[in-house]
Image: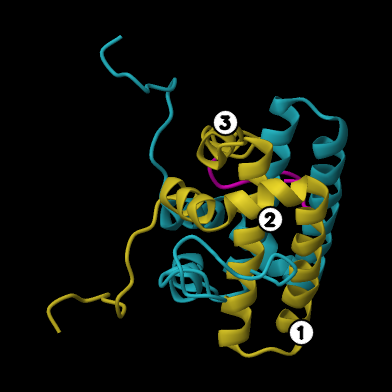
Chain colours: A yellow, B cyan
Amino acid sequence: MAEEHSRSSRPIVSLDEFQQLIRTMYFEKDAARGVDGTFMWLMEEVGELAAALRDGSHEDQMEEFADVLAWLTTIANVAGVDLTEAITRKYGAGCPGCGKLACICDDAGKP
Amino acid sequence: MAEEHSRSSRPIVSLDEFQQLIRTMYFEKDAARGVDGTFMWLMEEVGELAAALRDGSHEDQMEEFADVLAWLTTIANVAGVDLTEAITRKYGAGCPGCGKLACICDDAGKP
């Protein structure tokens, strides 16, 4: 195999692309449902993620992470929040707690 | 201004880069804490996001979306789940419900 770390059909996906994809797929119905109703779906998926982390296969876990990420993203779309801007502001300069790239905050503290 | 849609210091961030950044920052302490303990932090942040969506400023909402995304990502790191692979499998071929890029699933249904 030419490429040492090749993974089958695994593209590079930017957060922008993903947020736009989710917007294209779901914005119209999510906007009509509103943030509150959409948040309920996020909560259901968070519960399914918890269950998959307890008892699910790796495939199950991948599916539930994808769902939670998609619902989180769709709420960001409805709320008008740009996820790339959000994470760049919060994490672009290292850990918001200690300022280090590899966090050295107290373990009991919130990183 | 030369670029029509320029936003101040807004980079393109891939999901891979973000997952690696969060791994570098927090993997050691998150792995020690384990999935269960880390999930508790995610839940706290989800609560803060709900509060910000009700009463927070746009800045507050950006911060809480960033935090939820970071905690979700750190749990994926501990569980060994690649978020890019997860979303590509689930959403790479359009809506998992109807197969269309712009979802036409029944509104009452789960997209």
In terms of secondary structure, where does tag 2 sit?
helix
- The answer to whether the residue labelled 1 contacts the one labelled 2, judged by CB atoms less than 8 Å apart, is no
| Residue A108 visible from this viewpoint | no
**Disc number for residue A54:** 1
| Residue B77 visible from this viewpoint | yes
Mark 1 packing: few (<14 Cα in 10 Å), some, or many (20+)? few
Residue under mark 3: which chain is it in? A
Give the camera-side residue of B26 and B105: B105
- Whether callout 1 and callout 2 share a subunit is answered no
Position of A3 relative to B77 (above/below): below
Where is mark 3, residue-wise?
A89
Residue under mark 1: which chain is it in? A
Q: Please tell me in which quadrant of the rendered image residue B35 appears.
A: bottom right
The residue segment tinted magenta is A101-111
Residue A103 belongs to the span the image colors magenta: yes
**Disc number for residue B71:** 2
Residue B62: image location, x then y, percent: 67, 34
Estimate the spatial distance between the alpha carbons at disc 3 and disc 2, rounded to whole Å: 16 Å
Say which residue appears at 86% left-offset and 36% top-offset. Answer: B54
Q: Amino acid at mark 2?
A: Trp
